[in-house]
Amino acid sequence: MEIDTINLNPEPVPNVLCNAEKSENSEFSPVSSSSGSDQISEADIESSDHDSNNIEDVRDNFKTELARWAVIHNITFMAVDELLKLCRFHLPHLQLPNSSKTLLKTPKAYAIANISGGQYFHFGLELQLLHLLSSKRCTSNVLEVMLGIDGLPISKSSKKQFWPILGICKVLDERPFIIGLYFSLVSKPTSVDQFLQPLVQEFGKLKEMGLWHEHVRFDVKIKCVIADAPARNYIKCCVAFNGYSGCDRCVQKGDWSGRVIFTDQTASLRTDVDFINQSDKSHHVGITPLLLLDIGLVSDVILDYMHLICLGVVKKFLKKGPGRRDHFLIERVDNSLFACQID
Ligand SMILES: [Zn+2]
């Protein structure tokens, strides 16, 4: 995604219908009709029965609709600037601003918080969902959000890293949106409480008040949290995944065999209640803020296909398996995978 695209604007544009949608005799008809009775002109506005307040309202509504159009269709700042320049020249009475940032009410300053280990900016779950609701039709009153949390190294030559908190709400959009972003020159967030506090606090408010859009209340729920093994341990405040009590799913203690291995396939399974009560003390190193998200800390912090299979055993097999130096075998695997590829 381009950094300068408009959908990074954390402030959604209110869904206000312009007069063109309210009345067939609207003063705002398409800009392309440069002549004829539909044209917007100073004379039309001056001769209108509206008083000056109404003219102001019409202008404001047009600005709002234009801003909404730019956000919904992901128009770049540069393109909106060009459009504003044209409008200001040909339709000066609309009194449009010079800059897309003024039109879109882009904040001039962001509230970037200094937290333990680095800096954090909270884009906001509520704002992102409202942004989606303003452009998508939603048939459900329940918005289930899947969260994704992971570290993201920026370069190989430094320890600079992002830790984004992403969300997906499938009833609105298949694409992920950003909820919060941590940046550090040196390390992951050293306080998981500070890192997750804005999200947890905001969810608490949404749970109590609901999310309101055009007089409709939506209930927001966290469906699951997706993270790789190190990130799961970190956000759940558990011991490392390769520790003796590191298994997410069962209570067995691992054995040392050059590394910790888990061989017992009949061990008792962990439950969400056991996790809350910290029944297995050796599995926990603290109290996770995720408890406030109303999710099962065992069942809803899921083990996903991408991390376990694609980036897990398959990667390990290809890199460290018996065939790592067998170029002939690697070529056969490559060919088999290409043969499976769907066009
Ligand atoms: Zn296990």
Image (cartoon, rainbow, N blue to C red):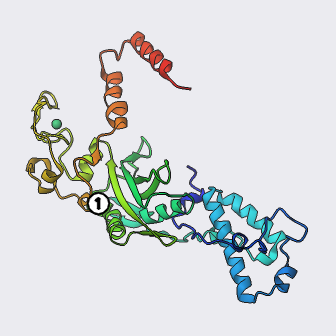
The residue carrying mark 1 has its beta carbon less than 8 Å from ligand 1:
no
Q: Quadrant of the C terminus?
A: top right
Residue in the image at 15% along x and 28% along y: 258
Q: Is residue 80 left or right of residue 174?
A: right
User: In front: 35, or 20?
Assistant: 20
Residue in the image at 71% along x and 78% along y: 58
Where does residue 135 sit, x and y in percent of width and height? Answer: 57, 59
Residue indicated by mark 1: 293
Q: Residue furthest right?
A: 36
Residue 298 in the image: above or below residue 136: above
Name the kind of residue labelled 1 in the image. Answer: Leu
Q: Residue furthest bottom?
A: 51
Specify the quadrant of the image occupied by residue 116: bottom left
Specify the quadrant of the image occupied by residue 269: top left
Label 1 neighbour load within 10 Å: few <14, some 14-19, many 20+: some
Residue 285 visible in the shown view: no
Q: Is residue 84 left or right of residue 118?
A: right
Where does residue 74 sit, x and y in percent of width and height? Answer: 62, 56
Badge 1 marks a residue whose secondary structure is: helix
Where does residue 306 sit, x and y in percent of width and height? Answer: 37, 36
Residue in the image at 49% along x and 48% along y: 175
Residue in the image at 74% along x and 67% along y: 84
User: In front: 334, or 32?
Assistant: 32
Residue 11 in the image: above or below residue 259: below
Q: Quadrant of ligand 1?
A: top left
Residue 11 in the image: above or below residue 117: below
Q: Residue furthest top?
A: 328
Where does residue 33 sit, x and y in percent of width and height? Answer: 85, 64
Specify the quadrant of the image occupied by residue 307: top left
Residue 28 visible in the shown view: yes
Q: Is residue 96 left or right of residue 163?
A: right
Marker count (numbered) = 1
